[in-house]
Image (cartoon, rainbow, N blue to C red):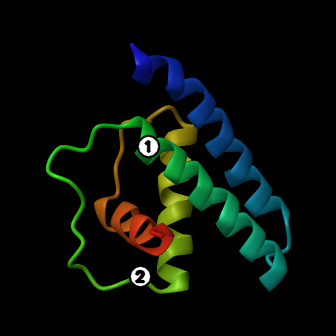
Amino acid sequence: MEDFLLSEPISGRAAFLVEHHQAVKATFADTSVWLKAAEDCVMMRIRSRRIIGGLPRHKAPLTRDQRIDRLQNLLRLWACGCTSVVDEDLFADIVKRHEP
């Protein structure tokens, strides 16, 4: 039930981020702001899910371009209502970089 309640805000936030990134001429500053907002959206989703077995922490970090591409693809899927989609490599990369 909790996943159902959270799916609408995630879909809406993802749709906003997808539209905003396409509308803005992707300057470095705009992309950095978008990247931070997109990662925050993913972190919110990670915290709301039970990921059985954890995330693969042994993987090499993603490059900035890889993160942007993966975030765009994931957010497009979430915006279309596919909120159960998980990109394990992206999730692991974001969690690893946000650890204290």
**Foreground label between 2 and 1:** 1
Secondary structure under the numbered disc 2 in the rendered image? loop
At a point 44% along the width and 68% down the height, the residue shown is: 99
**Viewer-proximal residue among 9 and 97:** 97
**Viewer-proximal residue among 53 and 24:** 53
At a point 37% along the width and 83% down the height, the residue shown is: 61
Q: Amino acid at mark 2?
A: Leu
> x and y percent of residue 72 in the render?
56, 61
Farthest left residue in view? 53
Q: Is residue 52 above or below residue 25?
A: above
Secondary structure under the numbered disc 1 in the rendered image? helix
Q: Mark 2 = which residue?
A: 62
Q: Amino acid at mark 1?
A: Arg
> x and y percent of residue 41 in the render?
59, 49
At a point 79% along the width and 55% down the height, the residue shown is: 20
Q: Is residue 80 above or below residue 25?
A: above
- The tag earlier along the polypeptide, 2 or 1, is 1
Which of the 4 image quadrants contains residue 60? bottom left
Q: Is residue 45 above or below residue 61?
A: above
Which of the 4 image quadrants contains residue 54? bottom left
Q: Which mark is residue 95?
A: none
Farthest front residue in view? 100
> Which quadrant of the rendered structure holds the N terminus?
top left
Within 10 Å of disc 1 (Cα), the crowding (few <14, some 14-19, many 20+) is few
Q: Mark 1 = which residue?
A: 47
> x and y percent of residue 68 in the render?
56, 72
Rounded to the nearest angstrom, the CA distance separating label 2 from label 1 is 21 Å
Pointers 2 and 1 in contact (C-beta within 8 Å) = no
